[in-house]
């Protein structure tokens, strides 16, 4: 029920300003973008799709920040593991 | 040596509950419903219960009991395989094929995975009053072409017509006979720890194609049904790897259902590696969009093989050398514990169970 | 898949797990409640608990909108479905929820026409294609889904459709969380906050939890790394003696929510004075109904539903599971009398219910599985 999937906007429909076509991994579907009418969406934007409606525009900068944080933690961990491997206590 | 009751007391409370649950699951299935519901046709738990409670009860005999894809019959010094399937797919025509293709390929495949060379098919039709003859000709044309491709012949048939509204256009039933020329005894009940589980190509294509072809979801995609005759592929596999324990045609219920049947029949654990399971990106996208797990989605041109661990390379080479097996992959192993369960090692690195489906997410897909 | 695969990376998970473990004080137990059913599902589907130390327990909360629907409302829906010329439409997860006399799929086997849809817009399409039938949409879900139901009603109004209505069972999350906080049975260290509900209501509504109850809350995304990161953020808050609302799911959740979505809900719906939640009892101002001005689209007004209150079966302990007091396997009927095939309560029916998730995905003990999957 909480199912929300990120999809990329690929096309708008001329006759229906409240709809847009999104692409999810090569599969396309028309969704209702009425809840994001203040966002000025354009093709290439990513949105969160829930039961046929776009609920939120994905903030790519925030996404990048989240991934950078995870990278950082990952790197720190890898460094520590390497340090552990190198150190000898005998 | 501690007694079973003492062993039970020593388990943690959680383990005690889990053990009680396993006992409850092992009990004979009882049919609780008074009327048939769609879930009875989905290939999951409800189907299993119906088969055990109604059909097995009435027809009990040793040839039926293994409940493999086809029955193996001793006849006049040789062995035959015999199978049947009914096709009620909606819509009748879809990307990649139609009900006619399914009707031939599905039955050919059930014979092939029984270790037989498919030879003869019957074709029974139930047609709705008002059904266009042009559509019937199209379906029958597909069946003829599929039969030629598979090297089988339709040798007998039947046609019935029912009043408008009493059938959904066209239902087809095909039964098939094949001859078993190898000394093999195939059956997933012989799976043992150390064996590997192989799949012949990417999964979920047929089921997703049908869901999208129904036109209710407004989803566009280039996914097409994978319906195909697998007898040639099976011949190549069995030539190269006689250590194949059992083969299954992965249809409704998907790969997950087959793995559960293996685990149950052989009393072993099946451990699947999620990363290794081949799924096309657009099938995956559609599944994510709809909230379905591709492991449960039907295929119509894929087989699952349980193979002796020592013969995995030979088996994989054989599969990959055939056009229908190009995307073959080793998706898991057989272990000894926990018996009867299917575990999935997720791509995230955690573990979870893969159980039989209870409901019916995709009614009438084959 | 972009924005999905990157957040399922196993290596990063190990790194985060190490960091989380490092923040655990020796001898201390930590209990976090994840409110949202979608989180319960992710945790089990990906085997997330394998990454957590023994001292951290995740408790499942009442954030499963299917799980909290009382049996009486299911009966009401089936009553509507049984009326002449009615096509009832519903999300898949509702199809097997048991009422007093069976679930939707049982009703189909008798005389009802209940169809599964993926969006309320599909329901509208069915209404357009069947002008001689009355099409009803079973509207369930928290604030995540309410805007979609409301938009669909507005669309129906715009098109002048006269044969469409919704049976509104939308519930709101804050009263549920408050009921948990006020429950004497539970001692929690923090909350993993709902992700998608927050895209609509934003993060401000949770501030009272941190401020008045002193519990940290982190709004979390639905990929396994999102959850791990959120747990990390909670542990950091505890370590540093903070209790705040933080937004881990910032790529999707705006702090102020979605104003348009809130407006649309408010235009079409209003809060009920009270509503019964399965397992939690009557909670005031916790659910939505269609406003008088949209009465033509309100199934409750269009059909005279019985509205009978049905008590849960005696054996059912869903309430305690929903509050996080009992773990699924601690319920007396879990797995024996109550299974996904023969569910007694809703926790076992919905794919997001804690019992269903545990039974279908997690039904084993850690040790056995570690051995099985190691080799």
Image: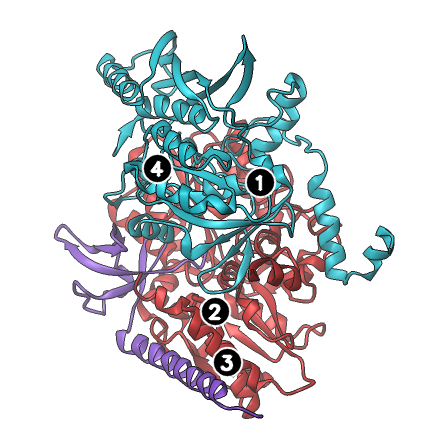
Q: Judge the density around disc 2: few (<14), some (14-19), many (≥20) Cα neighbours within 10 Å.
A: many
Image location (x, y in percent) of residue A71 = 36, 79
Q: Are marks 1 and 2 in contact (CB under 8 Å)?
A: no
Q: Which residue is mark 1?
A: B191
Q: Colour of chain B?
A: cyan
In the rendered image, what is the letter of the chain coloured red?
C
Residue pictured at 68% horizontal, 63% vertical: C327
Task: Label 1: state its secondary structure.
Answer: loop
| Foreground residue among C55 and C316 | C55
Report whether mark 4 lies on the same chain as mark 2.
no
In the picture, residue C146 is in which quadrant?
A: bottom left
> Which callout, 1 or 4, points at the residue further toward the start of the chain?
1
Q: Which residue is mark 2?
A: C194
Q: Colour of chain A?
A: purple
Report whether mark 3 lies on the same chain as mark 1.
no
Q: Which residue is mark 3?
A: C232
Task: Label 3: state its secondary structure.
Answer: helix
Q: Judge the density around disc 1: few (<14), some (14-19), many (≥20) Cα neighbours within 10 Å.
A: many
Q: Report, in whole angstroms, how far the alpha carbon at label 2 lies from the one at label 3.
A: 16 Å
Image location (x, y in percent) of residue B76 = 54, 8
Subunit of mark 4?
B
**Which of the two discs, 3 and 1, sits closer to the camera?**
1
Q: Report, in whole angstroms, how far the alpha carbon at label 3 lies from the one at label 1.
A: 43 Å
| Foreground residue among B244 and C43 | B244
């Amino acid at each position: 029920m909480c199912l929300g999937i990120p999809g990329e906007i690929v096309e708008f429909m001329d006759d229906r300003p409240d709809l847009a076509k999104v692409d999810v991994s090569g599969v396309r579907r028309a969704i209702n973008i009425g809840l994001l009418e203040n966002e000025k969406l354009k093709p290439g934007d990513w949105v969160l799709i829930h039961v046929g409606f776009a609920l939120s525009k994905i903030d790519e900068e925030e996404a990048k920040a989240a991934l950078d944080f995870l990278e950082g933690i990952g790197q720190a961990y890898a460094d520590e593991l390497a340090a552990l491997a190198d150190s000898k206590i005998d | 040596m501690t007694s079973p009751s003492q062993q039970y007391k020593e388990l943690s409370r959680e383990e005690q509950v889990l053990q009680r649950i396993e006992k409850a699951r092992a009990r004979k299935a009882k049919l609780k419903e008074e009327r048939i519901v769609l879930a009875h046709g989905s290939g999951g738990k409800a189907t299993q219960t119906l088969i055990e409670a109604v059909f097995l009860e009435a027809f009990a005999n040793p040839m039926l009991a293994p409940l493999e894809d086809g029955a193996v019959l001793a006849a006049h010094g040789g062995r035959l395989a015999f199978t049947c399937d009914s096709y009620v797919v909606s819509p009748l025509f879809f990307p990649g094929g139609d009900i006619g293709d399914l009707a031939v390929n599905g039955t050919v495949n059930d014979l092939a995975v029984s270790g037989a060379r498919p030879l003869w098919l019957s074709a029974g039709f139930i047609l709705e009053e008002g059904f266009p003859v042009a559509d019937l000709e199209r379906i029958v044309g597909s069946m003829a072409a599929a039969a030629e491709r598979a090297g089988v012949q339709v040798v007998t048939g039947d046609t019935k017509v029912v009043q408008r509204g009493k059938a959904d256009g066209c239902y087809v039933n095909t039964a098939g006979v094949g001859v078993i020329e190898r000394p093999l005894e195939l059956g997933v009940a012989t799976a043992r720890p150390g064996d590997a589980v192989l799949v012949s190509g990417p999964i979920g294509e047929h089921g997703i194609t049908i869901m999208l072809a129904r036109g209710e979801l407004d989803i566009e995609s280039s996914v097409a049904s994978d319906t195909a005759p697998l007898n040639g592929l099976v011949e190549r596999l069995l030539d190269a790897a006689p250590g194949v324990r059992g083969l299954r045609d992965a249809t409704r219920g998907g790969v997950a259902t087959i793995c559960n049947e293996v685990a149950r029949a052989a009393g072993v654990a099946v451990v699947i590696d999620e990363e290794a399971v081949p799924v096309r990106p657009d099938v995956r996208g559609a599944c994510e969009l709809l909230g379905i797990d591709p492991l449960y989605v039907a295929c119509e041109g894929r087989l699952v093989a349980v193979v002796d661990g020592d013969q995995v390379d030979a088996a994989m080479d054989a599969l990959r050398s055939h056009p229908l097996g190009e995307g073959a992959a080793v998706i898991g192993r057989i272990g000894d514990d926990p018996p009867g369960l299917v575990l999935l090692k997720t791509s995230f690195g955690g573990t979870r169970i893969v159980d039989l489906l209870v409901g019916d997410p995709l009614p009438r897909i084959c | 898949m972009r924005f999905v695969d990157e957040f399922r990376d196993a290596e990063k998970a190990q790194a985060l797990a190490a960091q989380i473990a490092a923040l655990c004080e020796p001898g201390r137990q930590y209990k976090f409640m994840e409110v949202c059913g979608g989180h319960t599902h992710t945790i089990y589907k990906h085997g997330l608990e394998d990454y957590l130390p023994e001292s951290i327990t995740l408790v499942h909360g009442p954030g499963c909108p299917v799980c909290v629907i009382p049996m009486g409302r299911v009966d009401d829906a089936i009553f509507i479905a049984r009326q002449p010329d009615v096509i009832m439409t519903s999300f898949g997860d509702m199809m097997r929820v048991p009422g007093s006399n069976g679930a939707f799929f049982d009703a189909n086997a008798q005389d009802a026409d209940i169809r599964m849809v993926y969006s309320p817009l599909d329901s509208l399409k069915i209404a357009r294609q069947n002008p001689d039938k009355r099409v009803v949409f079973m509207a369930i879900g928290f604030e995540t889904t309410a805007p979609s139901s409301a938009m669909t009603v507005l669309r129906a109004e715009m098109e002048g459709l006269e044969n469409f209505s919704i049976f509104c069972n939308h519930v709101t999350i804050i009263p549920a969380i408050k009921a948990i906080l006020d429950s004497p049975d539970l001692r929690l260290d923090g909350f993993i906050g709902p992700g998608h509900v927050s895209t609509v209501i934003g993060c401000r509504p949770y501030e009272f939890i941190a401020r008045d109850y002193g519990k940290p809350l982190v709004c979390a995304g639905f990929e396994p790394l999102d959850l791990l990161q959120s747990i990390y953020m909670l542990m950091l808050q505890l370590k540093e003696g903070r209790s705040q609302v933080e937004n881990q799911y910032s790529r999707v959740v705006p702090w102020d929510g979605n104003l348009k979505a809130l407006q649309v809900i408010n235009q079409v719906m209003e809060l009920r004075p009270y509503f019964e939640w399965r397992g939690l009892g009557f909670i005031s101002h916790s659910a939505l109904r269609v406003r008088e001005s949209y009465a033509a689209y309100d199934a409750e007004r269009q059909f005279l539903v019985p509205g009978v209150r049905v008590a849960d079966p005696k054996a059912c302990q869903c309430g305690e599971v929903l509050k996080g007091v009992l773990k699924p396997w601690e319920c007396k009927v879990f797995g024996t009398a109550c299974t996904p095939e023969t569910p007694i309560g809703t926790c076992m029916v919905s794919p997001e219910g804690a019992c269903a998730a545990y039974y279908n995905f997690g039904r084993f003990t850690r040790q056995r599985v570690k051995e099985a999957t190691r080799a």
